[in-house]
Amino acid sequence: GAGVSQTPSNKVTEKGKYVELRCDPISGHTALYWYRQSLGQGPEFLIYFQGTGAADDSGLPNDRFFAVRPEGSVSTLKIQRTERGDSAVYLCASSLAVGETQYFGPGTRLLVL
Amino acid sequence: AQKVTQAQTEISVVEKEDVTLDCVYETRDTTYYLFWYKQPPSGELVFLIRRNSFDEQNEISGRYSWNFQKSTSSFNFTITASQVVDSAVYFCALSEKAGGYQKVTFGTGTKLQVIP
């Protein structure tokens, strides 16, 4: 079956701009996660959804970052007033339920100039 | 707080050699899961294994094997008869019951290069 998909695969933007990154989880998976991976590092947790609500957003670095999952399936990670330090690969994962194995998408590579 | 250490930053081996990737973890929880993921050059994280903290039995899957030693807080990964397709970055990871298992903490990864 289809895995986790993320769009766009690459995004180049200018400092100060707004960006949206989209994640489409595996069908039937109720839990969705966002991670950020900087060069040479492992992924770092940002936020987790169980259904439509953000169950844990403790990993979001600041209030410029926001994520939604309005219908309990697709999620959008939104970054306002982007900064060069936001450049990274943003990974989305989903799991059948909380606590189950997380399966990752290919990521969106964000470059802020 | 949970922490995962992968001391080996990069390893190079010649094809058909065996290679072991080390992973040491820290947690205050008695119930947790350990994982290994593979990240090939394409960038997508591929799930390899999940192990419950109560199951110390070693596991073998084809050329892959995992050695879980609770006494030393280690969860090492061995690839037997390595192949060029094994070249990738490998991440060890941990999630705790106390955190609802939702946060997975990753190590910094070990880059494996298999030379033909």
Image (tube, coloured by chain):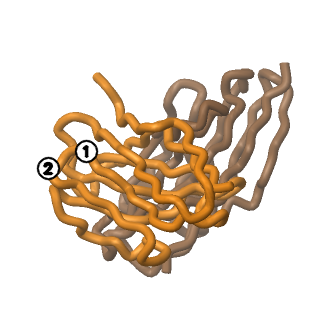
Chain colours: A orange, B brown
Which is more toward the observer, A51 or B15? A51
Q: Which residue shows up at 36% across the image and 36% down it?
A: A4
* Residue nearest the observer in this picture, A38 or B95: A38
Question: Residue B20 vs residue A50: left or right?
Answer: right
Residue B19 falls in image quadrant: top right
Placement of the C terminus of chain B among the 4 image quadrants: top right
Q: Tell me how far mark 1 sits from mark 2, CA to CA.
A: 7 Å
| B33 with respect to B115 (left or right) | left
- Would residue A99 appear left or right of B54 to someone viewing this image? left
Query: Which residue is tagged 1?
Result: A74
Pinpoint residue A44: horizontal percent, then vertical percent.
52, 63
Q: Residue at x 59, y 37 (%)?
A: B43
Q: Residue furthest top?
A: B116
Q: Residues within 10 Å of mark 1 (few under 14, many from 20)?
A: some
Toward the viewer: B115 or A60?
A60
Q: Is residue B99 left or right of residue B94?
A: left
Q: Chain of mark 1?
A: A
Q: So how many labels did they put on this image?
A: 2
Q: Are marks 1 and 2 in contact (CB under 8 Å)?
A: yes
Which type of secondary structure does the marked residue at label 2 adopt? loop
Q: Circle 2 sits on which residue?
A: A71
Which label was assigned to residue B79?
none
Q: Position of residue A39 (x, y in %)?
A: 69, 54
Residue B37 in the image: state x and y as whole percent: 53, 44
On the image, the x and y values in percent for residue B11 come to 81, 43
Mark 2 belongs to chain: A
